[in-house]
Image (cartoon, grey):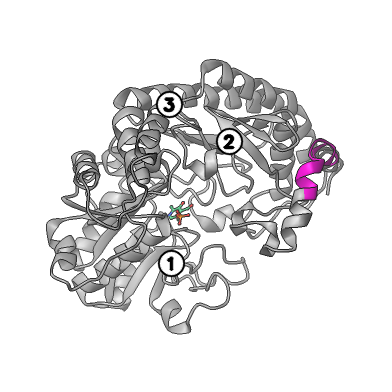
Amino acid sequence: MHEGLQQEINTYEKRTPRSKAAHTRAEGRLPLGVASNYRAYDPYPIFVRDGKGGHIRDIDGNEYLDFNLCFGALMAGHCHPAVMKAVQAKLGTGTMFGMPHDLEWELAEEICQRFPVEMVRFSNSGTECTMHAVRLARAATGRDRIIKMEGGYHGLHDSVLVSLKPKASEIGDPNFPTAVPGGSGIPKATVQNTLIAQFNDISGVERLFAKYPGEIAAVIVEPIMMNVGILMPQEGYHQALREITRKNGALLIFDEVKTGAKLAYGGACEYFGVKPDIVCLAKSIGGGFSLAAFASTRQVMGQISDHKVFHGGTYNTNPVAMAAGLATFREVLTKDAYTHVTKLNKKLLDGYNKQISKTGLNAYVIGAGSNGALMFFDKPIRNYRDWLDADSELWRHYWFAMVNRGVMAQPYWWDEQWTVSVAHTEADIDRHIATFAEIAPALAKAQKEPHVAATAGH
Ligand SMILES: Cc1ncc(COP(=O)(O)O)c(C=O)c1O
């Protein structure tokens, strides 16, 4: 570990003794001391006390400007007044019934008005959505195999927990990447049904359709890969995926768990001008509550109506989450909101760029909608294999240095990105940039020192 990073970690430990103690206690009862593996990192994670707007406070009383925003699930910011008002109104009138209510069709209509879909079902997490989407596609085609992109993340169910963060030694042939299970417990037969292509490699997808004619139910893709920082599709990539899937009788699933709310009013479908067969939504559509949806054509969703495909869930459409979702769509994720966050994000990206040029830091920043990421690479990455060269040591230096100065620039992990919320202000962006300006010279210096640069994920 280089000296600059070690100093920042020392400072972190001095600022957060209560988090350390809480984590030690939690480790006795929760594996890794956390409720989701993504929340665990060395030396220990920050334990949060509360949040408001674009800010959070930890249990040691430190305040942070929050661009993590629950891994991008809070474009609304914390406790958005419109969301809180809608939720509070619901709290006194019953939180769960397991029976239909009006908010269901109201929110479904809202989604159909923004996305090129005709029918919607709700669930509670992104994982559930992509699981149901894959099942619908399998049922619609009578085929078992799916294609997913190497390094792509679609949640935790078996079919997609494959080649999530494979090591360089495991990835195999670039033309036919190896399907690598994302941990133990995933049946071999399931892994065999998940075929892997590289993002931005249309010929890779074509090769798979040629190798497995009539066997592939769907291509599932995150329109902008946001599990390797930010990885943009090349011009025409999604149009080509659309064409190939259609030609081969397979469905195209857009996993818009992140992009659906954070990219544009109509998500990636609008942004890239593509009509996939199934759209998966979660995270920021709930304004801070567990809400997710999968949506498609009448024909595909009709499989549920026809009792061909089963979908259910005790917690689906609980009125609190639905009220939050409706308020979020109608009062938070407005056209004006996208103008606001895109403008702030541009300012933030410009600020980073200025410091990168000034300090000679070997890095670039990239953004889309409310998302942005500082990427420690010479040139824009094109796929997961390029991302494997990520300089995790330098990235950690960046993250701890920002956090120690009160800016949570993004979630911990160098495969994540920042989110600008509707609650952030010009002054917040100025402070974020000023903090980066303060640390950028040290990062540029550290980059020139010999250190362990490469990582194969986490
Ligand atoms: C693109 C994408 N799909 C699916 C998921 C899974 O969502 P959840 O954590 O709500 O299950 C995530 C979560 O980060 C995601 O980023």
Q: What residue type is labelled 2?
A: Tyr
Residue name at image x 36 percent, y 27 percent: 338
**Label 1: element kind:** loop
The chief SS type of the magenta part is: helix
Residue 14 falls inside the magenta stretch:
yes
- Other-residue count near label 1 (Cα within 10 Å), few / some / many at <14 / 14–19 / ≥20: many
- On the image, the x and y values in percent for residue 439 come to 74, 28
Tell me if residue 27 comes above or below residue 89 in the rendering: below
Q: Earlier in the sequence, mark 1 or mark 2?
A: 1
- On the image, the x and y values in percent for residue 193 come to 38, 77
Q: Give the range drawn in magenta.
A: 10-21
**Label 3: element kind:** helix
Q: Earlier in the sequence, mark 2 or mark 3?
A: 3
Residue 81 is tagged as 3
- For disc 1, the marked residue is 160
Spatial distance from mark 1 to mark 2, Cα to Cα?
Answer: 30 Å
Check the picture and name the quadrant holding the C terminus: bottom right
Residue name at image x 68 percent, y 48 percent: 391
Residue 364 is tagged as 2
Note whether residue 28 is visible. Answer: yes
Spatial distance from mark 1 to mark 3, Cα to Cα?
Answer: 36 Å
Ligand 1 quadrant assignment: bottom left
